[in-house]
Image (cartoon, rainbow, N blue to C red):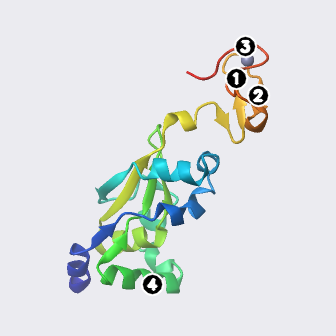
Amino acid sequence: MKLIQIILENTTYKIPNFNFEWEEAIRYPEFKKLGKQGWINIASKGKGVSIISAKDISNTDANKPGSFKLLDKDKQKRTLLQIKSGTVEMPIIAVYPDGHKELLGGNTRLTALMHKNGKATVWMFDVPEDILEKVVDDKIVCDNCGWEWKIIDGGDDLYMCHKCDYNNKK
Ligand SMILES: [Zn+2]
């Protein structure tokens, strides 16, 4: 246990490969609709943050003590080897305007780090409000009259309601 902790103290954290993590990001409609380059632009504006608890992070096993042992054995091994090598890619966490934190990639890494060391450095980036508001999946809902239309049918004035002429873009 002591040895592992010493190794972890010397861990170097790498900036995530956003190009690669796009595969995880497209599971979320708000990122999928941005396209790969849009995703990279937003995610790369984050920064490394040191955490000592994962309790407020959704979509990860890291908030349950001991859950590391329940993860896939091969994943456990690969992750421990990666940690031992001294270089770990930071798990990626999206922070939404309402404060919700969602792990997008690196569950095994985060769970291993929290389990073995009780802390981790993670990549946190803010999800801009303007990519979320007024957009429900692939639709836009008018704030004024409730009329909704598909983004694909929106044309040039995407945010302009054609029923009441309300401009839904701030
Ligand atoms: Zn309207």
Type of the residue with mark 2: Glu
Q: Secondary structure at mark 4?
A: helix
Marked residue nearer the N-terminal end (3 or 2): 2
Q: Nearer the viewer, mark 3 or mark 2?
A: 3
- For the residues marked 1 and 4, what is the alpha-carbon distance in whole angstroms? 49 Å
Q: Is mark 1 within 8 Å of ligand 1?
A: yes
Q: Residues within 10 Å of mark 1 (few under 14, many from 20)?
A: many
Q: Is mark 3 within 8 Å of ligand 1?
A: yes
Residue matched to label 1: 142
The image shows residue 91 at horizontal and vertical percentages of 42, 64
- For the residues marked 2 and 4, what is the alpha-carbon distance in whole angstroms? 47 Å
Q: Could one spot residue 101 in this view of the protein?
A: no
Marked residue nearer the N-terminal end (3 or 4): 4
The image shows residue 102 at horizontal and vertical percentages of 49, 53
In this rendering, the answer to whether 157 lies above or below 45 is above
Q: Is mark 2 within 8 Å of ligand 1?
A: no
Near-viewer residue (60 or 45): 45
Marked residue nearer the N-terminal end (1 or 2): 1
- Quarter of the image for residue 48 reads bottom left
Q: Nearer the viewer, mark 1 or mark 3?
A: 3
Type of the residue with mark 1: Cys
- For the residues marked 3 and 4, what is the alpha-carbon distance in whole angstroms? 56 Å
Marked residue nearer the N-terminal end (1 or 4): 4
Farthest-out residue, front: 156
Q: Residues within 10 Å of mark 2 (few under 14, many from 20)?
A: some
Type of the residue with mark 4: Arg
- Residue at 69% across, 25% down: 157
Residue matched to label 3: 165
Disc marking residue 21: none
Q: Secondary structure at mark 1?
A: loop
- Residue at 77% across, 30% down: 149
